């Protein structure tokens, strides 16, 4: 266990160094000049000397390895820098936006589980019945519709025509309904098929047939053996789809003008606010790696045989 955690920590450090360097270099290749955005050269007249002084003040006139080295040393001191535009610490702004995105993600996962788990389970238990056909139609339509288009439809129906839900912004729980529904439905369409396939595969396993032969009740077989066995591939797929979830959150936050991390980073990219973009990349990289570590640890809880195999190999 200790060796596994130490190995994961080293992988985290190596992954972070590679990702931070690549993202830092790619960021410099993006068209646009942050200095011109800060000085608003399109709105007011500024001299070339002012642009040169600002570039020197921000350290943008130094070679790329020097800029990266200084940023990395600064980061090791848990200093993520300050926004070029707001002049506020990046970490402070990140912590202000994080609760909004966590709420949206939690709402989306809740809707996804509320739809996908019962529908996928019923489709597996009543295979080739009408509920199975309905789940496949739902999965096909849900996975074919782009989430931003679905969001526009919801705004048109519930906010413009019926006027029962707000179309954008934040402040009440009702502001979370439409963006959560948009993300949750798109995810549910994918997971319905996975839950169905995983449960059908589990039902044909030898240990399920042995449990049935011992006279164990179908309800106990389902919750104690089938569902638990089916969770392992689902957890793996879920850890791999976290990146897609974050990407979808960005699109939905912009569409609904929701003030979370997604809208924050899109605004920063438009303004060439390098410290915010670099800080966001680091936060998301650490977040995804931590989620993957938690997922691997959860394997041991869902399937104790994995821990026993590792113990025998060590």
Image (cartoon, grey):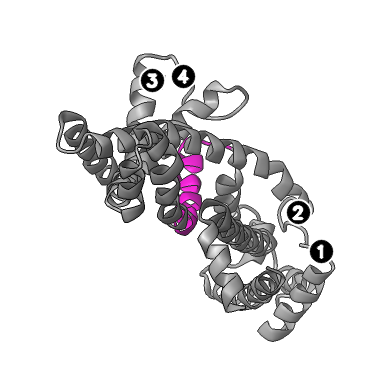
Stretch in magenta: 239-258
Is residue 251 rendered to the left or right of residue 100?
left
Mark 4 crowd level (few <14, some 14–19, many ≥20, 10 Å Cα): some
Label 3: which residue?
158
> Distance between the Cα atoms at labels 3 and 4?
6 Å
Image point 47% across, 33% down: which residue? 180
Question: Could you tell me how far apart the alpha carbons at marks 2 and 4 are, in whole angstroms?
Answer: 33 Å
The mark found on residue 165 in the picture is 4
- Left/right of residue 23 with respect to residue 145 in the rendered view: right
Q: Are marks 4 and 1 in contact (CB under 8 Å)?
A: no
| C-alpha gap between disc 1 and disc 3 | 44 Å
| Residue 106 in view here | yes
Whole-percent x and y of residue 218? 34, 34
In primary-sequence order, the first of circles 4 and 1 is 1
Q: Which residue is mark 1?
A: 78
Front-most of residues 128 and 304: 304
Q: Nearer the viewer, residue 162 or 241?
A: 241
**For mark 3, does the 10 Å Cα neighbourhood hold few (<14), some (14 to 19), or many (20 or more) residues?**
some
Label 2 belongs to which residue? 91
| Residue at (85% x, 68% y) in the render | 77
Q: Are marks 2 and 4 in contact (CB under 8 Å)?
A: no
Q: Residue at x 67, y 43 (%)?
A: 97
Q: Quadrant of the N terminus?
A: bottom right
Which structural element holds mark 1?
A: loop
Q: Quadrant of residue 122?
A: top left
* Mark 2 and mark 1 residues within 8 Å of each other at the beta carbon: yes
């Amino acid at each position: 266990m200790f060796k596994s955690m130490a190995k994961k920590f080293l992988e985290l450090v190596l992954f972070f160094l590679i990702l931070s360097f690549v993202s830092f270099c790619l960021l410099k290749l993006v068209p646009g000049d942050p200095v011109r955005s800060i000085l608003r050269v399109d709105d007011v007249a500024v001299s070339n000397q002012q642009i040169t002084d600002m570039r020197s003040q921000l350290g943008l006139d130094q070679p790329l390895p020097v800029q990266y080295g200084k940023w990395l040393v600064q980061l090791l001191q848990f200093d993520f820098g300050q926004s070029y535009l707001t002049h506020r610490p990046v970490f402070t702004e990140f912590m202000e936006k994080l609760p909004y995105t966590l709420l949206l993600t939690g709402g989306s996962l809740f809707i996804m589980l509320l739809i996908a788990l019962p529908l996928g389970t019923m489709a597996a238990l009543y295979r080739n019945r009408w509920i199975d056909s309905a789940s496949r139609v739902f999965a096909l339509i849900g996975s074919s519709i782009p989430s931003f288009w679905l969001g526009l439809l919801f705004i048109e129906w519930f906010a413009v025509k019926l006027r029962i839900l707000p179309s954008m912004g934040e402040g009440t729980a009702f502001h979370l309904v439409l963006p959560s529904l948009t993300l949750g439905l798109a995810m549910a369409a994918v997971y319905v098929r996975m839950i169905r396939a995983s449960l059908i595969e589990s039902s044909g396993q030898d240990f399920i047939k042995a449990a049935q032969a011992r006279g164990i009740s179908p309800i106990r077989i389902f919750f104690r053996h089938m569902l638990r066995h089916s969770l392992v591939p689902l957890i793996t797929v879920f850890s791999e789809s976290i990146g897609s979830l974050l990407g979808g959150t960005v699109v939905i936050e912009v569409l609904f003008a929701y003030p979370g991390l997604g809208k924050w980073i899109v605004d920063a990219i438009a303004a060439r606010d390098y410290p915010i973009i670099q800080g966001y990349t680091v936060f998301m990289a650490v977040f995804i790696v931590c989620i993957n570590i938690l997922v691997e640890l959860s394997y041991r809880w869902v399937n104790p045989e994995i821990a026993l195999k590792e113990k025998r190999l060590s």
